[in-house]
Image: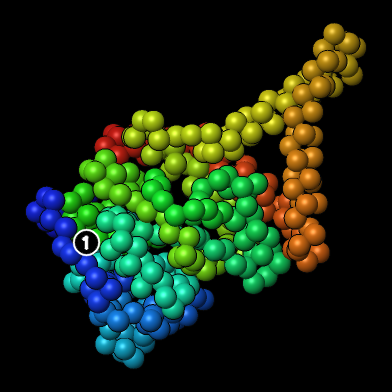
Amino acid sequence: MNETRPGPPGVRPAITTRTPVSVIMPVRNEERHLAEAVRHVLSQDYPGGLEVVLAVGPSRDATMAIASQLAAADSRVTVIPNPTGLRPAANNLAIKASRHPIVARVDGHALIPPDYLLQAVRTLQETGADDVGGIMAAEGVTPFEQAVAWAMTSPAGVGSARFHTGGRAGPVDSVYLGVYRRSALEQVGGYDESYLIAEDWEMNHRIRQAGGLIWFQPRLRVTYRPRATVAALAGQYFHYGRWRRVVARQHAGTINLRYLAPPLTLLGITAGIAAGLSGLAGALAGAPGLGWLALGFCAPAAYLAGIGAVTGAAARGLAASVAARLPAALVTMHMSWGAGFLTSPRSLMPGAPPQR
């Protein structure tokens, strides 16, 4: 599954705000944001030691060249190859190549604030948690990115997950990115490389099953750059939905209404359109007894009315160009997640036999 060496069970070395931290970054096709992301890591106001391990996958852009330049400019940066290009494998390779008792995962398009590591390590120390994380503070540049950012930080877009929408500090199922005790990672064997998406959630679930604590700290806000196009956003949320169902299959009882809302909505809209078309066809064919089926069109109409109401309420605080793109962002996220969840094949299950 991975190459992380398990440590002695139950060993939890004491940590302080001077305990050195290893920052691992799985990167691929990140030339747009990588240098800025690493600069934010290296500029941390943290009194302990710091190293950055970049696990670079095969890229179509200049990611490897940028990573090599960053390593040449600062001895705290190390570059290792990730031949598969897959994120869980990159995380495990970076953990193996790192040295310190605390491991912080940061994405190549995430910008951490100057006190991020200090706040995270303090929270580990004060709560005894095995993993802490905060808010995925999406911020866009273009009007479409800003619309996606609004949707990603609103219950209307992503439900009530605290790492998206905020809330009080406390235990949670999972967090964004994560700052871990190395001992907790080693105890559960690191990331399951069978998971191409949702690998953080799945590993945090195993940490909790082993008696560990995952802690949400709202003071930790990480700037996240959303996808820039409808196609990219659709692909992202399709895979989110697809792999969230894999988690639900493997770990019974981990699904809830927040995850089921998009597929149920998509099923309702699809059934409503099918019924409505049948009623319309029946009426045109002279079969008035089927006309009532045209009421099925109320399902998509009600959904679109809800999207319109959300957009109207949000528009008071958004630029017109952003508000105009918000319906596309919301519909793309909802429908793509739902489609991914509904079409998720059982062959994605870890240990499932390959399809012939």
Q: Which quarter of the figure has residue 262? A: top right
x and y percent of residue 107 in the render? 42, 67
Label 1 neighbourhood size at 10 Å, few (<14), some (14-19), many (20+)?
A: many
Q: Quadrant of residue 336?
A: top right
Q: Residue at x 57, y 63 (%)?
A: 138
Residue 15: x percent and y percent? Answer: 22, 67
How many circles with numbers are drawn on the protein? 1
Above or below: residue 59 compared with residue 162 = below
Q: Is residue 21 left or right of residue 99?
A: right
Label 1's element? helix
Query: Which residue is situated farthest in the left direction here?
Result: 8
Task: Give residue 302's position: percent from left, percent from top.
Answer: 77, 34
Camera-side residue: 251 or 344? Answer: 251
Is residue 47 rendered to the left or right of residue 29? left
Q: Residue at image x 22%, y 61%? A: 182
Q: Nearer the viewer, residue 217 or 91?
A: 217
Where is residue 290? Give x, y as percent: 82, 12
**Residue farthest to the front, as pictured:** 126
Query: What residue is shown with label 1?
Result: 182
Residue appearing at x 34%, y 63% in the figure: 123
Q: Could you tell me if residue 209 is visible in this image?
A: yes
